[in-house]
Image (cartoon, rainbow, N blue to C red):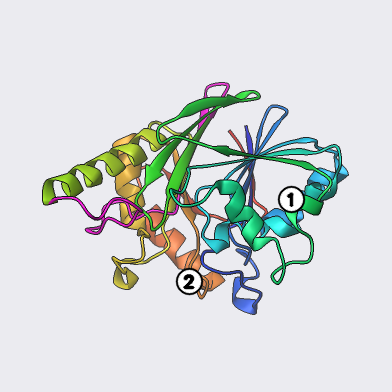
Amino acid sequence: MQITFRGVRGSYPVAAQHSVRYGGNTPCIEVWAGETCLIIDAGTGIRSLGKDLVKRDQREIHLLISHTHWDHVQGFPHFDPQHNQNAHIRIYALPHEDRSLGDVFRAQQQAPFYPVTLADVESRIEFIELQDGQSFTIGEAQVSCHRLNHPSVTGGYRIEHEGKVLSYVSDVDLYGPILHGAGMKNGSVDQQRAWHQYLQKSALDLANRADLMICDTFFLPEEYKPDWGHSRPEDALRLGQEAQIQRLALFPHEPHRSDEEIDAIQERYRKEAPFDLFASVEGLTLAL
C-alpha cells in the first residue's frame, strides 16, 4: 500500500510563509492498494491529485469522505477527473438523515457558487451511502467505516491490503465530555454514556494494530475546546497505545500553526510516544 499526503491543514487552506514546509491544503490522502486508487477526503489537496490522475488516465476512482464539512469537500469542484468521460468516480460516506450524499455534493457545485454543475461533467459519478460499521471490498482493498464523535455525521476508515493496515481517525474528539454527532445528544444520561463508549470502541476498532494511524491532533492541550469535536496529541497517543499501532501521523494542522511550531510539536511528542510518530507533511509518500 502506498500513501501520499495531499492536504494536511484543518479548517481552511493557508497560503502563507509560515506554512511553506508542511503545506496549506485541506485534508486529502491518496492511497494505492495495488492498482486500486482510493482517496480519503476531498479538501483542496485533491486538486493536485486530480491532475496527476488525469495524466495517468486513471479511470476507476474511489473517494472515501469522512464527513461533508467544507474543508473535507471543498476541493471536489476542482477535481479534474470529473471532466474525463472515461472516468468512474464512486463517492462513499455515512448518510445524513435529511439529505442524500449526492444532494450535498450537488449543492456546493451549482450556481451561484460554481459555474459547472455535476449534471454537466463528463465523468460518471456514483454516490454510495454506507452503514456505520460496514465492511466492504474495493478492488484489492478491504475497507471498513465507523462513526466518530464529531459534529454532523462523521466516519473514520480502515483500509487493509496484503496484511497492512491504514487507519484514518479524523475528525474526532476521542475522549472529550461532549457528544457532537447528529442524533446523539437527546437521550438519557445512560444513553449518552453508552454513545461515548460505543464511539470510543469504534475508534479503537479502526486503529487496532494499524501499521499507520492518521489521527486528529488539531489542538494542543492548552488550546482544547470541548465543543469543537477535535482531539489533542495526548488523545492520539492514548488511542495508539490501546490499539497497539506501529506509527502515528499527527493530522490535521491548525491553520495558524507555523512550520517551526509543528517541528516543536513533533519533537515534543516523539519523546512521549512508544511508537514512531511524525507530523503530516503535504507531498510525503509512504509505503506500507
**Residue 260 badge:** none
In the rendered image of this protein, does residue 162 appear above or below residue 219? above
Region of the chain picked out in magenta, as a range: 160-188
**Residue farthest to the bottom?**
17
Under circle 1, the secondary element is helix
Q: Inspect this view and state whether residue 282 appears.
A: no
Q: Amino acid at mark 2?
A: Glu
- Determine if the magenta segment contains residue 178: yes
Q: Position of residue 19 (x, y in %)?
A: 61, 71
**Residue 49 badge:** 1
Residue drawn at 66 percent across, 24 percent down: 139
Q: CA distance from mark 2 to mark 1?
A: 27 Å
Dot 2 alpha-carbon crowd within 10 angstroms: few under 14, some 14 to 19, many 20 or more: few
**Residue 261 badge:** 2
Residue in the foreground of this view, choosing between 118 and 246: 118
Dot 1 alpha-carbon crowd within 10 angstroms: few under 14, some 14 to 19, many 20 or more: many
Under circle 2, the secondary element is helix
